[in-house]
Image: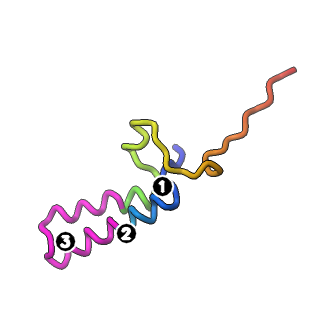
């Protein structure tokens, strides 16, 4: 299973995930803040199941490059 989360997307997911977890642990938000674990885990793994379901990828074009095999002559 390949990665489908790009560098910028990963950084945003880490920031949002840590922010939500910090807010939940300090009592600024209710228990729903622990949902921040989801974007944090998808950033750390590099795979987003929702992106995969809708066939989306935030990888930069050079990260998505897969050379084609030459056809037999």
**Mark 3 / mark 1, whichever is N-terminal:** 3
Look at the image and say whether residue 21 sits in the magenta stretch: yes
* Residue 9 on the magenta segment: no
Residue 22, horizontal then vertical, whole percent: 25, 75
Q: Which circle's residue, 2 or 1, is located before the other in the chain?
A: 2
Numbered disc 1: secondary structure:
loop
Image coordinates for residue 42, horizontal then vertical, percent = 40, 56
Residue occupied by mark 3: 24
Q: In the image, 41: left or right of 26? A: right
* Local secondary structure at mark 2: helix
Q: Which numbered marker is on residue 46? A: 1
Quarter of the figure with the C terminus:
top right
Query: What segment carries the magenta color?
Result: 16-39
Report, in whole angstroms, how far the alpha carbon at label 2 lies from the one at label 1: 15 Å
- The answer to whether residue 42 is left or right of residue 73 is left
What number is the disc on residue 15?
A: 2
Residue 60's x, y, as percent? 58, 52
Lower position in the chain sequence, tag 3 or tag 2: 2
């Amino acid at each position: 299973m390949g990665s489908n989360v790009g560098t910028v997307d990963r950084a945003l997911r880490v920031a949002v995930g840590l922010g939500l977890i910090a807010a939940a642990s300090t009592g600024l938000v209710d228990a729903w803040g622990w949902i921040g674990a989801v974007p944090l885990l998808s950033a750390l793994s590099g795979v987003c199941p929702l992106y995969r379901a809708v066939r989306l990828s935030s990888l930069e074009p050079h990260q998505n490059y897969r050379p084609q095999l030459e056809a037999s002559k």
